[in-house]
Image: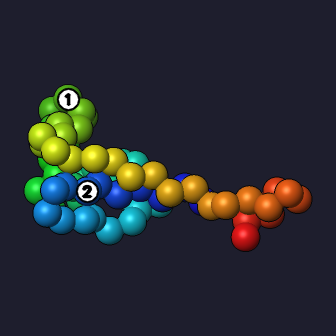
């Protein structure tokens, strides 16, 4: 399962299972905001998106 979180120079957000939820909660750490009129996410300067994907072994099963 892929997980998403935003990181600012001073704070790290929680992991969320989908990008939309991570974007909606980004304002809590000062990472940006979701413009409700356009539906676009506005990221503040210095904010990074971190994506975590599970490691797979040779059989394709998550370790």
Q: Residue 10's spot in the image, x, y percent?
A: 14, 63
Give the image quarter of residue 36: top left
Q: CA distance from mark 1 to mark 2?
A: 23 Å
- Left or right placement of residue 54 versus residue 17 in this view: right
Q: Residue 6's spot in the image, x, y percent?
A: 29, 55
Q: Examine the rendered structure and indicate whether residue 14 appears above or below residue 39.
A: below
Q: Which residue: 27% across, 65% down? A: 13
Q: Residues within 10 Å of mark 1 (few under 14, many from 20)?
A: few
Give me the disc on residue 7.
2
Q: Residue 57's spot in the image, x, y percent?
A: 80, 61
Q: Nearer the viewer, residue 48 or 14?
A: 48
Q: Residues within 10 Å of mark 2 (few under 14, many from 20)?
A: some
Q: Which residue: 18% across, 40% down? A: 43
Give the image quarter of residue 1: bottom right
Give the image quarter of residue 25: bottom left
Q: Which residue is mark 1?
A: 38
> Considering the numbered disc 2 on the image, is that residue within a helix, a strand or a loop?
strand
């Amino acid at each position: 399962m892929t997980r998403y979180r935003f990181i600012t120079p001073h704070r790290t957000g929680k992991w969320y299972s989908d990008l939309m939820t991570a974007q909606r909660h980004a304002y809590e750490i000062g990472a940006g905001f979701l413009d409700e009129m356009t539906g676009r996410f506005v990221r503040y300067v210095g904010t990074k998106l971190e994506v975590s994907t599970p490691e797979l072994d040779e059989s394709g099963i998550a370790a």
